[in-house]
Image (cartoon, rainbow, N blue to C red):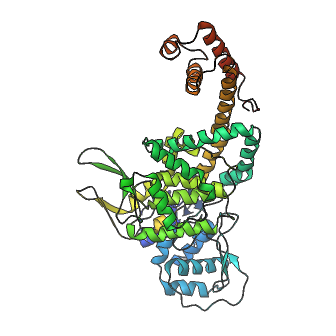
Amino acid sequence: MQFEPPADTDPVGYAWLIDHFGVKVPRPRQLSYALRKGSPRELHDGDLVTKVFARAATPASTPSAHLEFCLKHEPLALDVLAILLERLDADQLAEHIRAKPLGKYARRLWFFYEYLTGRRLALPDLETGNYVPLLDPDAHFTGSPRNSGRHRIVNNLLGDQRFSPVVLRTERLRRWQSADLAARARSIVADYDPQVLARAVNYLYTRETMSSYEIEREVPNPSRAERFITLLRTAADRGDLDKPAVVTLQNAIVDPRFRDADYRADQNYVGQTLSWTAERVHYVSPKPDDVPSLMAGLLELMRRNQTTLHPVVLAAVASFGFVYIHPFQDGNGRLHRWLIHYVLARGGFTPDGLIFPVSAVMLSRRTEYDRCLERLSRPLLEVIDWRLRPDGSLQVDGETAAFYRYFDATTAAECLFDWIEATIDSELKAELDFLVRYQRARVAMQAVVDLPDRKAALFIKLCVQNQLHLSPAKRKAHFDMLTDAEVAALERVVADAYRRGGEAGSEGG
């Protein structure tokens, strides 16, 4: 058995099916067991749940009965479901559905089988019965509805067979959705003078660019940094993305020598070199043959849900889906973070003309960001058959596409909401307050000495770093042209500006 059951229980649902078919799959969010004796209970390990049911909940010992149990009692694990359905006996499933053709769970199972496997059961189309949603909208974030007349099912998956992650409507996400972070951001921005905001924009774009590169421990040259800033500035004005547009984006942010003309044709992975002969693999990306359909599905999901799905949820699905697909040899991480801004700006979540420096929060919470990425990557290492060749290339055996097409993006959405709130309440306000203080000090300094801009900026920086005083060493190195009285007066100006705080105002006019 791949997963160890609690004492005195028997597996049901996904746990029974995984054991029955002997498949290697990432652990579903919930595994279920039925009691032999004792009381029902739940065991929690982070976002993973082991749920123990009363004995009476045990389904019949057939794959179809246990699959129906999954749909009734367990969070949807679409990646696992797709793999299990490939191994299901079609005649046995058809017999199961004939016994209750109008049952909503039987119909859902019927739809999932034909939709995910591409095989048709020997069943006639339904001609009666109300349409039922494939996913319960109270339990899932859902996509634009499409009716399936054959099953009388409303297909509300986020995507299609090529790419359709699942986002569960957890309590955390319910709270985030009702918090209306977009309104909170607009309220903060409304308190600042438009000229302060205009100056803030330049800094925020630069801050986001440098943080995004720093996450990957890179320092871009000025031309590469400027190209990325331009991409961020124009994100809101871009239409729907297609393959040529995505290739163009990649070409704009990488060293010209590493531009790709198409999606990658080689197997890639994320790893760490330990020595000349040892490599630690952290993540195995999809096979190159699967990348075109995965990317086509991702781009279609973005287009289809652009006006209907919460922008933060869509940004999480799109950006994390992109980095998991890893369609290029270089630039995947930066494009992953750029997609967050693209989706938020197009969805009207970001105030016009501004940007949230989300990468700065990711950088400051690097361990948390890595854990979020590893929510998919770490389990995959245990279930994918891969090996490193002597030349450092990686070979993947077997079919792996379902792991990337239908992954659980719930944790990614929760993390992104958390980072955006921190960005709005901390980073954005801090940067705006800094500019208010800086401009207040800069204007007042002109009445003492009209320093060149670079000198004035350096004076403010050195004072702020030294408890609002210029150290003797820094004065000798940079400001020996100033008199004692001028230095003292400039220090008072800076101290007054920074001690008064960053309340909004129009002093910077």
User: Going by the image, does 335 lie left or right of 167?
Assistant: left
* The C terminus: image quadrant: top right
User: Going by the image, does 83 lie left or right of 159?
Assistant: left
Q: Residue at x 53, y 87 (%)?
A: 121
Query: Which of 223/276 is in front?
Result: 223
The image position of residue 77, as x and y in percent, is 54, 65
User: Quadrant of the rendered structure where residue 457 is?
Assistant: top right
Residue 406 in sight in this render: yes
User: Going by the image, does 10 lie left or right of 400?
Assistant: right
* The N terminus: image quadrant: bottom left
The image position of residue 116, as x and y in percent, is 52, 76
Residue 44 in sight in this render: no
Query: Which of 199/322 is in front?
Result: 199
Q: Total of numbered circles in the picture?
A: 0
Instruction: Spot the residue most to the top.
Output: 484
The image position of residue 25, as x and y in percent, is 44, 64
User: Quadrant of the rendered structure where residue 158 is?
Assistant: bottom right
The image position of residue 434, as x and y in percent, is 65, 31
Against 419, residue 193 (above or below) is above
Q: Residue at x 44, y 59 (%)?
A: 326
User: Quadrant of the rendered structure where residue 154 is?
Assistant: bottom right
Q: Residue at x 42, y 70 (%)?
A: 290
Query: Which of 507/240 is in front?
Result: 507
Against 209, residue 461 (above or below) is above
